[in-house]
Image: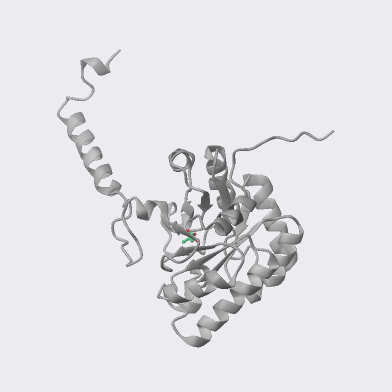
Amino acid sequence: MSVHVETKRMTTALIRQKKAAGDKITMLTSYDYTLARLVDQAGVDMFLVGDSASNVVCGNQYTLPITVDEMIFLTKGVVRAAEHALVVIDMPFGSYQISEEQAVANAIRMMKESGADAVKLEGGEEILPAIRHMIQAGVPVCGHLGLTPQSVNQFGGYGLRAKEDAEAAKLLHDAQLLDQAGCFAIVLEKIPAALAEKVTKAVSCPTIGIGAGNKTDGQVLVLHDMLGLNQGFKPKFLRHFANLGEQVQTAVADYVTAVQDGSFPNENECY
Ligand code: KIV
C-alpha cells in the first residue's frame, strides 16, 4: 500500500509552472538552519546551498576547496528549515567532472544524505552526458552557465562572460542543450542582460539570473551579500537590501561595553 503525503513544499514542476504563468521566481543562497528558517518564512521559492559556502562560510578565496561531505553537512540544516522552499544543493568542484558514473553516484548520495530536492552543476555541452544520466536516474538538475566560479582558474577572474559573439552563441547553444536534456532551471551568472533575455526566450525551463539583468524568469543572490554582511563585496549587480554588517558590529560593540562597564547583566537579567 502506498502512502501519499501532501506537501506544501515547492516542487520543480511548480517552478516550471511559474515561468509559464509569467510569475517571477525567487532564489537565495542559505547555508544554515537559523537563517534558512527566516528566509523560508519570508516566502522565497528556492534555496540554493551554494558552493559559495566555501567563501561565505569557510573563508576560502575560491569555491574550489569545498567537499561533498561539507556540502551535505550544511544542506541538512537548510532542509530542516525548509517548510515551503525547494532546496537545491550545489555539486562541488571535482564531484561530477571525472566520469558520468561518478557524477550520478555523487548526485544520488548528496540527495539521499542531505535531503535536498535537486542538484546544481556548472557547465554546458561538456557535462551533458552526466546531466542526462542524473535526470534518467530521477535527480532534478539545475544548470549553471555564464560565469561559473569553479572555472575561475580557466577564466582568470570573475569578469563579465559572453561579451563576444562566439561565447554568447556557445552559451545560447548550451542553454538549449540543457533545456532539451530536462534541466528544470538554469542559472545565468554575470552575462549581458540582452543575452540573458534571448536565452530566456529560447528555452522552455526557467532561467534564474545573477548579474544577468531583469528579463530572466527569476533572480538569485548570495544571502550574506544582499543582507550587507559582506561589506567589502559590492559588484554592480548587487543590491544591499539591508545593512546587517553594521548592525552586527554595533550590537557586538554595545555588548562589549555593557560587560566591561558592569551594566550587563542588570538586576532583571539575573535569577
Ligand atoms: O554558489 C553559489 O552561490 C552560486 C550562485 C552565485 C548562483 O552558484
What is the image's colouring?
one colour
Query: As displayed, is residue 53 above or below residue 113?
Result: below
Which x, y percent locates residue 93? Answer: 57, 65
Give the residue at the far left of this rendering.
261
Which x, y percent locates residue 125? Answer: 64, 76
| Residue 97 seen in the figure | no
Count of number-bearing discs: 0
Which x, y percent locates residue 180? Answer: 68, 69
Nearer to us in this view, 47 or 112 = 47
| Residue 271 seen in the figure | yes
Q: Which residue is drawn at 31% across and 55% down?
A: 240
Q: Which residue is drawn at 34% across and 50% down?
A: 227
Q: Residue at x 17, y 25 (%)?
A: 262
The image quarter in which residue 211 lies: bottom left
Query: As displayed, is residue 23 above or below residue 182?
Result: above
Query: As displayed, is residue 198 above or below residue 73?
Result: below
State left or right for residue 13 relative to residue 147: right
Q: Which residue is drawn at 74% across and 35% down?
A: 4
The image quarter in which residue 210 lies: bottom left
Query: As displayed, is residue 90 above or below residue 113?
Result: below
Where, quadrant-wise, is the N terminus in this rendering? top right
Give the residue at the far front of this rendering.
21
Give the residue at the far top of this rendering.
271
Where, quadrant-wise, is the C terminus in this rendering? top left
Which x, y percent locates residue 250? Answer: 21, 42
